Image (spheres, rainbow, N blue to C red):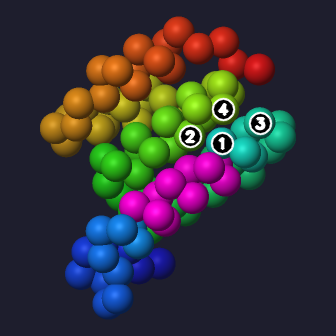
């Protein structure tokens, strides 16, 4: 599977951001629907396509936004932090939420 990056023909920053946000929303929706195994597989595919800190942040943020637990939140936020992303506010939100 080929990854999506800025050098991919026809893909700019806005399209990549849209891909990340929409993919993350689908992931969070699968968790909310009780489809944890499907969500995990889908997230793995998303990360194969977009192995970036912004993809990891989008996955966690989508879960926090709809108040569902994100099983990989700590790992993904740690990885994003190691890449230089400031995820302190999102980490705080994830830690204080009450998943449904």
Query: Contact, CB < 8 Å: mark 3 with mark 1?
Result: yes
Query: Contact, CB < 8 Å: mark 3 with mark 4?
Result: yes
| Residue 7 falls within the magenta-colored stretch | no
Magenta segment, principal secondary structure? helix
The span shown in magenta is 17-27
User: Closer to the camera, 79 or 28?
Assistant: 28
Query: Contact, CB < 8 Å: mark 2 with mark 4?
Result: yes
Between marks 3 and 4, how big is the CA–CA gap? 8 Å
Q: Which residue is mark 1?
A: 28
Mark 1 / mark 4, whichever is N-terminal: 1
Q: Which residue is mark 2?
A: 62
Between marks 2 and 1, how big is the CA–CA gap? 6 Å
SS type, badge 1:
helix
On the image, the x and y values in percent for residue 80 come to 29, 38
Question: Which residue is found at the position 49% from the left and 13% from the top?
Answer: 95
Q: Which residue is mark 3?
A: 32
Between marks 3 and 2, how big is the CA–CA gap? 11 Å
Between marks 1 and 4, how big is the CA–CA gap? 8 Å
On the image, the x and y values in percent for residue 11 come to 35, 81
Question: Which residue is found at the position 73% from the left and 39% from the top?
Answer: 31
Between marks 2 and 4, how big is the CA–CA gap? 7 Å
Q: Is residue 9 above or below residue 31?
A: below
User: Closer to the camera, 43 or 89?
Assistant: 89
């Amino acid at each position: 599977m080929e990854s999506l990056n800025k050098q991919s023909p026809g893909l700019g920053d806005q399209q990549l951001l849209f891909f990340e946000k929409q993919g993350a929303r689908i992931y969070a929706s699968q968790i909310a629907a009780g489809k944890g195994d499907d969500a995990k597989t889908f997230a793995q595919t998303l990360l194969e396509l977009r192995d970036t800190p912004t993809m990891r942040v989008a996955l966690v943020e989508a879960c926090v936004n709809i108040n569902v637990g994100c099983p990989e939140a700590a790992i993904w936020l740690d990885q994003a932090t190691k890449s230089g992303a400031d995820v302190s506010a999102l980490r705080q939100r994830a830690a204080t939420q009450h998943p449904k």
